[in-house]
């Protein structure tokens, strides 16, 4: 279970040099325009992964908000059935939150790899605006007062929804028992 929930580390750009380049550093310098074009394309691809992650989060956030609205509507006039009938929908909702968490984690891992490749590309360019300069200016993501990576924040949202569903179910069970 640890490998599904424990944060993985991003590859180091220096470790990617052997698998990234198809020649020595001299051939890279003679084809700098090609490397710059590949760099631009790859940064765009990495940015698209971030956009897809945002779209997935929007989907799950909208879905869970709609579920909370539906629960609120039914809460006004709850059915007279046993609250334990809600156990299966609760399990489905918690599983959905778990899938959401894994999707966020997967996008985080994919982006970590992509940005490490960007860093490896920048090692052969005249400047390293993202990998060295920007990331250093942000404290390499280690100081939350300077920069708190979004994926560290967004991974808590599915967890909070799951906790809300569980506590809501417990409240329904206890309310029904108290009314009996």
Image (cartoon, rainbow, N blue to C red):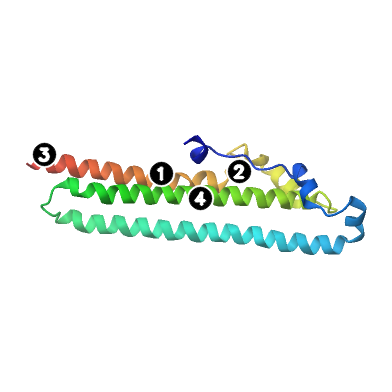
Locate residue 39, reporting x and y percent.
Answer: 76, 59
Left or right of 174: which side holds 11? right
Q: Closer to the camera: disc 3 or disc 2? A: 3
| Disc sitting over residue 104 in the figure | 4
**Sequence-first tag of 3 and 2:** 2
Sequence order check: which comes first, mark 1 or mark 3?
A: 1
Q: Which quarter of the image is occupied by the C terminus?
A: top left
Measured Cα–Cα span from mark 4 to mark 1: 12 Å
User: In the image, 150: left or right of 15?
Assistant: left
Calculate the distance from the C-alpha at mark 3 to the C-alpha at mark 2: 47 Å
Looking at marks 1 and 2 on the same chain, the residue that comes earlier in the sequence is marked by: 2
Residue at the spot 56% in from the left edge and 61% down from the top edge: 51
Quarter assignment of residue 160? top left
Q: CA distance from mark 1 to mark 2?
A: 22 Å
Residue ID at (63%, 59%): 47
Q: Nearer the viewer, mark 1 or mark 2?
A: 1
Front in this rendered view, residue 134 or 179 = 179
Q: Which mark is residue 178?
A: 3
User: Which mark identifies residue 147?
Assistant: 2
For marks 4 and 1, the one nearer the N-term is 4
Give the spatial CA distance, label 1 vs label 3.
28 Å
Badge 1 crowding class, 10 Å Cα cut-off, few under 14, some 14 to 19, many 20 or more, is: some
Examine the rendering and report whether any part of residue 167 can be seen.
yes
Mark 1, residue position: 159
Q: Residue at x 53, y 43 (%)?
A: 152
The answer to the question of whether label 1 and label 3 lie on touching residues, with beta carbons closer than 8 A, is no
Viewer-nearest of discs 2 and 4: 4
Mark 1 near mark 2, Cβ–Cβ under 8 Å? no
């Amino acid at each position: 279970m640890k490998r599904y929930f424990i944060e993985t580390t991003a590859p180091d750009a220096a470790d990617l040099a052997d698998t990234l380049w198809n020649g020595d550093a001299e051939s890279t310098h003679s084809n700098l325009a090609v490397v710059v074009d590949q760099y631009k394309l790859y940064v765009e691809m990495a940015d698209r992964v971030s956009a897809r992650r945002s779209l997935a989060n929007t989907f799950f956030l909208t879905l869970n908000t709609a579920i909370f609205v539906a629960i609120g509507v039914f809460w006004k006039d709850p059915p007279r059935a046993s609250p334990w009938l809600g156990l299966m929908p609760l399990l489905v909702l918690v599983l959905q939150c778990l899938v959401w968490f894994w999707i966020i984690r997967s996008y985080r891992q994919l982006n970590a790899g992509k940005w490490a490749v960007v860093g490896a590309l920048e090692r052969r360019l005249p400047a390293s605006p993202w990998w060295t300069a920007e990331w250093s200016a942000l404290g390499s993501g280690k100081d939350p007062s300077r920069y708190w990576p979004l994926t560290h924040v967004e991974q808590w949202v599915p967890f909070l929804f799951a906790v809300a569903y569980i506590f809501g179910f417990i409240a329904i069970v206890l309310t029904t028992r108290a009314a009996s």
